[in-house]
Image (cartoon, grey):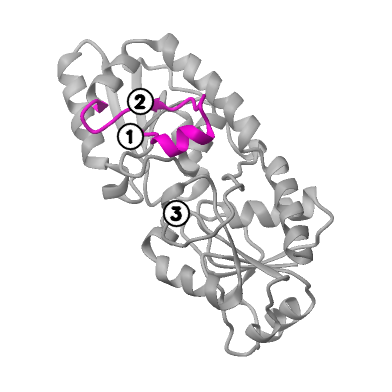
Amino acid sequence: MRYASERVIAHQPSLIWKGLNEYTQHSARLIILKDSYLGYPTDIKYNEVEPFEIIEALSNTDFYIFVSQIVMFPFYNLQGKLNRNNHIILTYGSEVRMNSANFLLSWLRADTMIVTSHDYTQSSPVGFSVQHLPISVDFREVPEKAPLDDGVIRIVHTPTAPQIKGTDLFLNAVKKVQEKHSDLKIEPVLIEGKPWSECLRLKAQANIMYDQMAIGSYGMGAVESWAMRQAVVGRANAWLRSWYPDLPIWDATPDSLEQRLEILVTHPDLVEKLGADGRQFAEQNHALETNLRKLSWLIKHVQER
């Protein structure tokens, strides 16, 4: 099996490559076309190997998993090998929202199965897709929450897409809460432009994580925080709640964000409960081993359909 990704998105290609080898009967390789500053583990980096190594990896396979789009190589006729029974496309983040036409063309041209998570906004422009492969997390990689013992309430946020995530809304809401509760030490922490391992270290020092506001769903950052037993603030729309009625996200809207943050910083017991509930939710729905068993059965379905 070969797993081709244009770039590593939300750590998922690395995790699934590792998980396929560890938890299933498949033998997988991962080809990354564009590496990122986050430093996720990877296998074959396109710009660091000779073409014959990629040709060998692509030739010795019976199933292909693409991330975001079908990748073509100038020195190998991969298109000629693809059929409806030997490949899928996995989507993460804003890829389908931003490039829906590309996904629709792939689906129509090749009868390709497009696999998404529960995020309705990803699949709605595409038409048919499979929505039962949640974001995965390897709990062995994520540290336990360990806030610094200095009396500061830290609220962490990763502004990778500030408009989608509502970064300005978050900062303005925190500022108003700080003004109302000058007796409390409240600090917003923005994490950006750092390697993934450093992101996790800094995140673990926080009490609360603010995720996003515009989409109505959640991403890898929230899943990692739940794995740390950290309270997560965000907006969950009705579609998301239809999948997870007991979702442990501390729900907020742009109008209520200030009030919802204020409740958390003044109720530490609630923060701890949300963190414990989040860990249980992540174990039930986002464990890498469980999701790789799902993917393994999905591969078998595609091969037999």
Going from the N terminus, do you reach mark 2 or mark 3 first? 3
Q: Secondary structure at mark 3?
A: helix
Q: CA distance from mark 1 to mark 3?
A: 28 Å
Q: Which residue is mark 1?
A: 189
Q: CA distance from mark 2 to mark 1?
A: 7 Å
Relative image position of residue 226 (x, y in whole percent): 52, 30
Q: Which residues are magenta?
A: 235-257
> Mark 1 against mark 3, which lies toward the viewer?
3
Q: Secondary structure at mark 1?
A: strand
Q: Name the main secondary structure of what is drawn in magenta.
A: loop
In which image quadrant can residue 102 be found? bottom left
- Is residue 246 a member of the stretch shown in magenta? yes
Relative image position of residue 113 (x, y in whole percent): 61, 64
Q: Which residue is mark 2?
A: 154
94 relative to 275, above or below: below
Q: Secondary structure at mark 2?
A: strand
In which image quadrant can residue 213 be found? top left
Residue at 79% x, 48% y: name it.
23
Of the pair 108 and 56, the residue shown nearer to us = 108
Residue at 65% x, 83% y: name it.
78
Count of numbered marks: 3
Type of amino acid under label 2: Arg
